[in-house]
Amino acid sequence: MRKNKKAFSIIGPCSAETREQVLETASLIHQSKLPIDVFRAGIWKPRTRPGNFEGVGKKGLKWLQEVKATYGWPIAIEVASAQQVEDALNSEIDVLWIGARTATNPFSVQEVAAALKGTTGPVWIKNPVNPDLDLWIGALERIVQETKGEVGLIHRGFSIFRASEYRNHPTWQIPIEMRRRYPEIPMLLDPSHMAGKRALIPKLMQLGVDLDYDGWMTEVHCQPDQAWSDAAQQFKPIDLYEIIEDIAWKQKDKINQGEESLLEQYRQHIDLIDEEFFNILNRRMSISEEIGQLKQQNQLTILQTERVQETIKKWLSLGESKGLSKEFIQKLYEAVHLESIEHQGKKLH
Ligand code: PEP
Ligand code: MN
């Protein structure tokens, strides 16, 4: 993202609450000059726990038609069932998205896909709540099989078992892999649901630009603190406008000539370091295999929990002294340790 400062922007409140709230939010977007390609609002809200606001339902569709008639923006809503797709299509909703909870369930995705058969409007698919690349790919395949319209992906983060400062942890490697496999499919970032709180959103939007996303889906509300859903993550349109003003836009591949060769040198350097890194890993694993044999001869278990605890402590302090995050070191340790256990067992079979 993006030459010419262009981010494809789906903007609007988390939920349509009242006619006034929808129209007031749209009017504030218009006044703020916030760049917008599509206006969003949830009509049916999938809530994790019962008893929360579950959306206004069909009556909200009329309010969205009013927004479209007034400002000319295409309208997007979330759909999770065949009935909802039918209601949306009957109300001339232009754009649909599949929410994270729905994307986890192949039955639901298939039902929505079947209802979309032969339709031509764009459909965006959020990542499933759990960090499962195949599930996201499956949802994409099901929708692509049926719709004739454009299909895109929205990265909104994942539930993970570790504590995280994010409401939904980015787990960047999943969208990066998704884009490697499907380079032609646009990918938006949803910093609102990823962050869960306003303070983290500017940093995420800048990251979206740096990581070359095609745009974003971001929540705004005329009175964010009074919102009936997701109050802590919604901005007033003018505040989101200010954040976007502060974004440092990046080019994808144009670089000054002198700097091009510098970039090339840095990349060669990185490649050499990677080679060295793999040689070191290979040495570490060979020693693990020797250790495995020694443990076998002495009838010791492969897993020695005390040793694991000591080593991770050492890793964390080494990592800290080298400016590496605790989270990264933990993940790296888990991966290296698992591989090492495999190698310890290798010579035994
Ligand atoms: C939403 O966009 O309002 C929403 C419910 O998001 P998600 O499916 O990402 O939780
Ligand atoms: Mn929301």
Image (cartoon, rainbow, N blue to C red):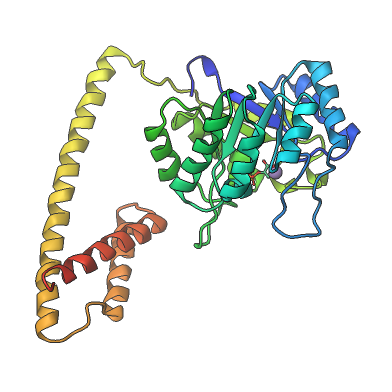
Residue at 24% from the left image edge and 62% from the top image edge: 339
- Residue found farthest to the bottom: 299
The answer to whether residue 329 of the structure is visible from this angle is yes
Measured as percent of width and height from the top left, residue 164 is found at 53, 57
* Image mark count: 0
Residue at 23% from the left image edge and 69% from the top image edge: 341
Measured as percent of width and height from the top left, residue 80 is found at 68, 43
Rendered-image quarter of ligand 1: top right
The answer to whether residue 171 of the structure is visible from this angle is no
Q: Quadrant of residue 175?
A: top left
Residue at 71% from the left image edge and 49% from the top image edge: 46
Q: Is residue 194 left or right of residue 268?
A: right
Measured as percent of width and height from the top left, residue 152 is found at 54, 30
Vertical side of 269 occupied by 33: above or below: above
Residue at 48% from the left image edge and 24% from the top image edge: 1
Q: Is residue 192 left or right of residue 71?
A: left
Quadrant into which the C terminus falls? bottom left
Vertical side of 272 occupied by 64: above or below: above
Vertical side of 189 occupied by 132: above or below: below
Measured as percent of width and height from the top left, residue 135 is found at 49, 47
Q: Quadrant of residue 284?
A: bottom left
Vertical side of 227 occupied by 64: above or below: above
Residue 155 vs residue 136, the one in the foreground:
136
